[in-house]
Image (tube, coloured by chain):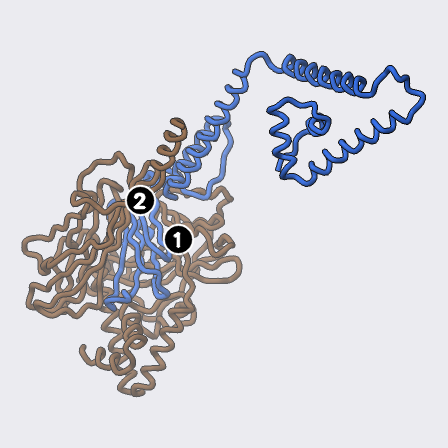
Amino acid sequence: MRSSSVLLATVLALVPLNGVLSAAALPKIDFPVDSPVDLLSADYGESNETARGGALLLDFHAALSLRNATQRKIRGITLLVTAQDVTAGGKGSVTITSLDVGPQETFPVRIDLRLLRPLQASSSVPVQIGLDGVLFDDLSFYGPDKLSSRRTMTLSEWEARRDRRYFKSVLASGGPERLRQEMLESLTHEADRPSLDVQVVRGGRATNFEPEKQVQFAFLRLPDSPVEPVDGMARIAGNEARAPRLEVKNRSDRAIRYLEVGWIVHDQTGREFLAGSVPAALNLAPGQQSRIFENATLKFPQLGAQPLSIESMTGFVSSVEFADGTLWIPTRGDLGSPQLQRVMAPSDEEQRLAQIYRKKGLAALVAELNKF
Amino acid sequence: MKHPAEVQIALFAGGDVGRWERWRVARHVARCAECQHEVQSLRDAGTQLRELSGEMPDLPNALGWNRLAQEITGNIRVGLAAGEAIALFDKPASTKPRLGWNAALLLLGATAIFAIAFWSSLPPQQAEHLLASLKRIRTERIGTVIRSGAAAPDEVVVEASATGIQVKENGRTLSLMHPRSDGATVSISMQGSAGVRFVDADTGQVTTNKVYYAEQ
């Protein structure tokens, strides 16, 4: 009887137990004193912690309410999320773009974070939330920019302006019915676009023991791209692609300091996926040629029931930042090429506008376009 | 319902059981039609035999049926008692070894329950890490390369999927989750970051979650 009780107690001790987060476990939110946004409230509603085996699972669901404390309109914000206790080198960010927040207006930011750490880890505050940057409507920026959020949000804002301009022209030339057709096409494109899970491992090969082969990149050359991809290859083994090497040439008359090359993979059945991108910070003078190398491995765990096997690859220049801070992004005409159309997602802004059309209708969409 | 043994029924039918046994068998027979029938059959057979013995001129008059029946019954009892004595003699002298096996089985069962409970309550990442460590121990011990679907345990992995993005390091994980949405767009940068972009259904905001590793 006594041994049965001990056994029952042992088993019960191993069953996951849920609990509300203690005050000490709640994230610490720390904005600079001159921050352009004020934190009005933070609600951690359904946050909880669960002991599982020898680990602690912390689920944070934070709903923050922020206020624009400046006299300018905010277009984007990036919050930095760190958990030194959990991953020494790891961090996260939550970015909201396509905002239109006027002076003293409030806006929400949701953060859904999950941490897994050993039970015996230190009991200090596990998560810290800070401000990495705020982008204003005049494209000025505030913040430490540790995560290059200035470039990310500016790119997004450029794309948003490009797409709003396009949809406004559609409305002006074809009327609301033509705009409706564009939205329906966008929603269909979004639903049909293939996607897959992907991992990136820094350094050498992940775990694939299949023999490697060197595969040459094919390139999709966009007519007005300031950068021309000249040559490129990567090592392929089954479902892994690693160590891409690219050679690019600056064909513009301005120096370039950053570029990204999109990477499309083709599998054994002929399907295509936008697998990732190869970014490069460099100093590329006009007419100059340079090599890009990344010592990392892309791995595609599974595609349905069948493991994906990479057969060939295509690269294309997806964005460029000039030394003067201005940007180049593909035009809507470039994105309309059949291969990009198949794999590229609509831009942030196009998705947002399509959601407005889907939820609120054509009149709301027209009103939204007319705000800008 | 458990029936008394045939021999008990037979003895009961002949009135040759002790008081306690008689009460026990009688109690059963009163409720069991099958045994009632058996008892009645035996009693009828006894009566017929006695009647038959009276008609049989070959049997010596001095023999007496009742005395013969008592002797047979006595022999049966002696036989049963001897059988029980032999059975006891054949049993192991001590019951301690059986208790030992029971204890071992109990311990084995408890260990199995503990292991199952521990494994099932372990988060997938921890389980994967533990499994990879065990495989590595096995590899080192027997010198065989074992293929694994997971990355090497000490490597940092940045991962993007339809439900979330995460950075994994030594079995520890930092994940940013997002609502399952048709419009979620996953992206990976070879510099060690994973991102997912979606339109928040509640706020209509375009949200991009990212996780990074190391120098970024």
Task: Please determine whether, in this image, residue A242 is positioned above or below residue A68.
Answer: above
Label placed on residue A362: none
* C-alpha distance separating marks 2 and 1: 16 Å
Evaluate if marks 2 and 1 touch, with contact meaning CB atoms under 8 Å apart: no
Q: Secondary structure at mark 2?
A: strand
**Please, what is the three-letter code of the amino acid marked with disc 2?**
Thr
Residue occupied by mark 1: A198
Instruction: Answer with left or right where residue A30 lies relative to residue B84.
Output: left
Chain name for mark 1? A
**Please, what is the three-letter code of the amino acid marked with disc 1?**
Val
Can residue A284 be seen?
yes
Residue at horizontal 12%, vertical 50%?
A30
Instruction: Answer with left or right where residue A243 lies relative to residue B54.
Output: left
Chain B on-screen colour: blue
Where is residue A143 shown, x and y percent of the image? 13, 56
Q: Nearer the viewer, residue B18 or A165?
A: B18
Chain A on-screen colour: brown
Q: Are the residues under marks 2 and 1 on the same chain?
A: no
Residue occupied by mark 2: B173
Residue at horizontal 18%, vertical 78%?
A371
Where is residue A43 shown, x and y percent of the image? 17, 56
Check the picture and name the quadrant holding the N terminus of chain B: top right
| Mark 1, other Cα within 10 Å: few <14 / some 14–19 / many ≥20 | many
Of badges 2 and 1, the one in the foreground is 2
Where is residue B117 shown, x and y percent of the image? 41, 37
Residue at horizontal 15%, vertical 63%?
A135
Chain name for mark 2? B
Residue at horizontal 36%, vertical 40%?
A15
